[in-house]
Image (cartoon, coloured by chain):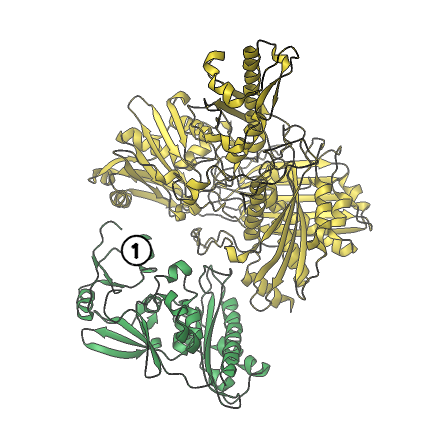
Chain colours: A green, B yellow
Amino acid sequence: MSQLQYYAPGSVEDAVKALGAGGRAMSGGTDLLVQLRAGRLPPGPIVDLKNVAGTQGIRQENGGWIIGAATPAALLGEHAGLVAAWPGVVEGAGLIGSTQIQNRASLAGNLCNASPAADSVPALIAARATCIVAGPGGRREVPVQAIVTGVGKTSLGPGEFVLEIRLPPRPPRAADAYLRAIPRTEMDIAVAGAGADIVLDEAGVCQDVRVVLGAVAPTAVIVAGASAALVGFRLDEAALERLDSAAQVVCRPISDKRGTVEYRTRIAGVLARRAVAIAWERAEKRA
Amino acid sequence: MTDVIDKPKQDGPDLKVVGTRPVRPDGVDKVTGRAAFGADYRLPGMLTGRILRSPHPHARIVSIDTTKAKALAGVKAVVTAADFPDLDSEEYEAGESAADIRDLSLNVMARHKVLYDGHAVAAVAATSASVAEEALGLIEVVYEVLPHVTDVVEAMSPTAPLLHEGMITQGVTPPPTRPSNIAKRFASQRGDLEAGFAAAEVVIEDSFTTQAVHQGYIEPHACVATMTEDGQSVVWSSSQGQFMVRTYCAKLLGLEVADVRVIPAEIGGGFGGKTTVYLEPVALALSRISGAPVKLVMSRDEVFRATGPTSGTAITVKIGATRDGRFTAAQVELKYQAGAFPGSPAGAAVMTALACYDLENFSIIGWDVVTNTPKVAAYRAPGAPMVAFAVEGVIDELARNLGIDPIAIRELNGVRDGMKASYGPTFRNIGFQETLQAAREHPHYSAPLAPGEGRGVAAGFWFNVGGESTAALHLNEDGSAVVVTGSPDIGGSRASMAMMAAEVLGVGADRVRPVVADTASIGFSMLTGGSRTTFATGMAVTQAAQKVVESLKARAAMTWETGAEHVAWENGQAICLDPAKDVKALSLAELAANAARTGGPISAEVSLNAQGAGPGFGVHICDVAIDRETGHVAITRYTAVQDVGRAIHPAYVEGQIQGGAAQGIGWALNEEYVFGDDGRMQNSGFLDYRMPVASDLPMIEAVMVEVPNPRHPFGAKGVGEVPIVPPLAAVANAVRGALGFRMAHLPLSPPKVRAALDRSG
């Protein structure tokens, strides 16, 4: 990391221009700078998005939430309204790195770094969050799951960057949760993760559910069989067993220093079950 | 918690300073970031060095072409093994263990062959880090890649790739005719093994493995070195022994010892891993060529790949006992990975394996085996934790099998004063039984367990050593004092030095400033290791202080015109006992202020070779809760009981006990070197080399048992190493209790625990 070109544009237009010229997007820099320093990425111009209008802050609009792309994860946990509405999304953000890292790290950075183990991504996908992507062609809104296409790869085109992350309005009796498994208790990277978002009807029966797994495939994966396992049912051991199996089916993990295929697959089922149980309990309390 | 002043112990001598908890003398520098560690030194015109490391675990070096690197603008020096003398084998004693100078030289810079991923092959010094990095890429090394072996058991196979083509196993008669990777066989036995097992009513045998783990000091190796045209050399570096660095640099570069001065930096952790050299001779070689000071700092990746670790092991233990729990015989075979060069702690492991127990019949065989992994370095009680993991695991099974309480079976078989230790000497003033009793009586041991939790107990032993130390005490004109030693402070020893000097002088610890001096400013001292510093250097400090007190008494006598025999030293002042004199006591400050008129400056230096270090014993109690779905083991309560002789600074002793336990817990649960099929380390960073974080551990309760060592002026025994010996077994025994079956292969990481649970149905 000898010579570094650094740009800190203030407008979306300038940011698009700088990125289009070959710059690398940075918000907190907690992944990018580490990768540059370790020599895993060749040195290149950095475009710091923290000053770009619209990339900072959390606000409510039409019942939903808009989170600026470079907003530090720490602020999410300090935002009472967001914590109440989307506890699972906040839990995911609150597990990125460490407290110190979260003073810089952002949701969009965690997403666009495109690690399969990104802690904030499963809960965002479970929440049906979307991204406002700014680029040379203007702005487009895409679901979070459409951003990451593979390990270290995104669907963002030249000059494009994530400007905002949007969370939809909450119906009553809805709640989410995120859990991950790590060998330690903190300062670690997910061996597997599970985000769950659930909506119950007045009788406490599951109306809608989405469960998303992290670190068990090249990208976060939606548990396709979750609806079949849970919708129309109350929370019981049988329902959770069906979900456990449905979760294991979608796993396509690798064996590496962090865990084996067998371990990751089994643990994904466990986490899916536990995350759904937590989200369910939270949803019931909102009845 | 260290600013609380305890009352002196009532059961010992009347001590005013020893046994209290003053604020550490190096504390402000450390908490404010002012303390200067190895990487903090910079000199005018200093160059930045970088080391080129082998990407192969085993290869022949066909050629190294440095032409392009040397031609790069900004490159001032490039060195390879050709720039170091090609030394003959020579054993050299410089710390806890002997080093072979040729092996050390070959480890510092590979010659002919690289023996592990990360082995240094060349180094550059340049005007900036980026130029140095670029130059590394311009060095052309042609390797002939060879088959490799990283596992200790595989390395012992007759078909394994040979690291050293001429290596014949030592310690075997007659000597083998063919070379192998087995460097040495160690053996220790007593009595009649066969008869012992024949007398047993229960025999338990099991095989265990542990993985290589790193000391994990937070400060990477770092140094600045400069050599002038006439060979005068100065090194600033962080190590456990500036005299060790001096000796090794002189030997490896062919210099006179007097021409090398080593200035110790503050040290950010060592744990045994900084008892050797990696960078200092290379920085000096680069400085010799460039004529400029050279700084070398390792990255964490380099620390993992090229320094430390301690051995991965395979150990089999068989113990027989009568129905009432008395051991009749024990048989231990241990295989220790040495890394690229001979010198695993297998010998120490053989000596410590059964040291806690009174056994009439035993046999212990140890094997020191080279592998294509970094050369192991000392790590806190080198060799003992792994064999304790195995032995204490088998004892735990025996206790379960016989329905005997695990502490009771250890009390029944544990060593006592007057018994001949398994490793030779006769035990005197040991505190094993007292430690076991304190553990048994501790509330933790009788506290109920939550459903599904398990409790484990394990004991551990370490020799502790004395050795050569020098200390000087200089009295200042205002009555304050400076105590100078050559012992780097890796565990709070500076505070202890000041306290022991203050105790003798009869002043407060804050009146004595401790300094760790460079090799030109104090007499020789062995490195800080073997839990020797507070014992041995503390003895030198105490004697130097006593000499100063003698001088003060003589000066008071001179002032009073009486004989020195009429002067007593009490509470920091000279008191006249001569009934013919009616004089007031003379304080330390008064005597110091008057020094010029009574014979000049008051100071003393003592050099000694301290004998009589007292061995240490620890007993740990560990509770675990296991998430049976994720395999995660949580330590829910941990108590570490240890005989410490007498705690000079109890807070530091507690800190040593807690730190040792924390490292041992990490070793048991998650730490391990992971090698790929390509022989390269897969986890050379703190993300994937999983040391415990604060939230992984409960408050570790340290319980100090004080059975004083009469060979030390204040009763001190070494305390730093014992606490890492029991935890591997304590954790594993607790997991055994929770699971209902034993896991004999470390680490007990979540994937392995879950897989074991799945297998057990």
The foreground one among B128 and B255 is B128
Is B452 drawn above or below residue B471 in the view shown?
A: below
Give the SS element for disc 1: helix
Residue B290 in the image: state x and y as whole percent: 26, 31
Residue A151 at least partly seen: no
Q: Position of residue B602 (x, y in %)?
A: 49, 18
Please state the chain letter of the residue tagged with numbered disc 1 in the rendered image: A
Which residue is label 1 attached to? A36
Residue at (36, 40) in percent of width and height? B39
Question: x, y (%) of residue B374?
Answer: 46, 43
Which of the two residues, B673 or B418, is positioned nearer the viewer here? B418
Left or right of B748 on screen, residue A131? left
Q: Quadrant of the C terminus of chain B?
A: bottom right
Task: Give the class, few, some or many, for how many residues have Cα within 10 Å of label 1's Cα (few <14, many ≥20).
Answer: some
Residue B433 is situated, as x and y percent measured from the top left of the image, at: 73, 42
Q: Which corner quadrant of the image does residue B369 belong to? A: top right
In this picture, residue B645 sits left or right of residue A104: right
Task: Report the residue at 36% width, 61% height from top.
Answer: A103
How many numbered circles are shown?
Answer: 1
| Residue B761 can be seen in this image | yes
Asked which quadrant contains residue B227, the reply is: top left
Specify the farthest residue to the front: B582
Above or below B211: residue B28 = above
Taking the image as shown, residue A28 lies to the left or right of residue B348, namely: left
Q: Residue at x 71, y 46 (%)?
A: B438
Q: Is residue B446 left or right of residue B677?
A: right
Q: Quick one: A27 or B471, which is closer to the camera?
A: B471
**Vertical arrangement, residue B545 with respect to residue B412, above or below:** above
Q: Amino acid at mark 1?
A: Leu
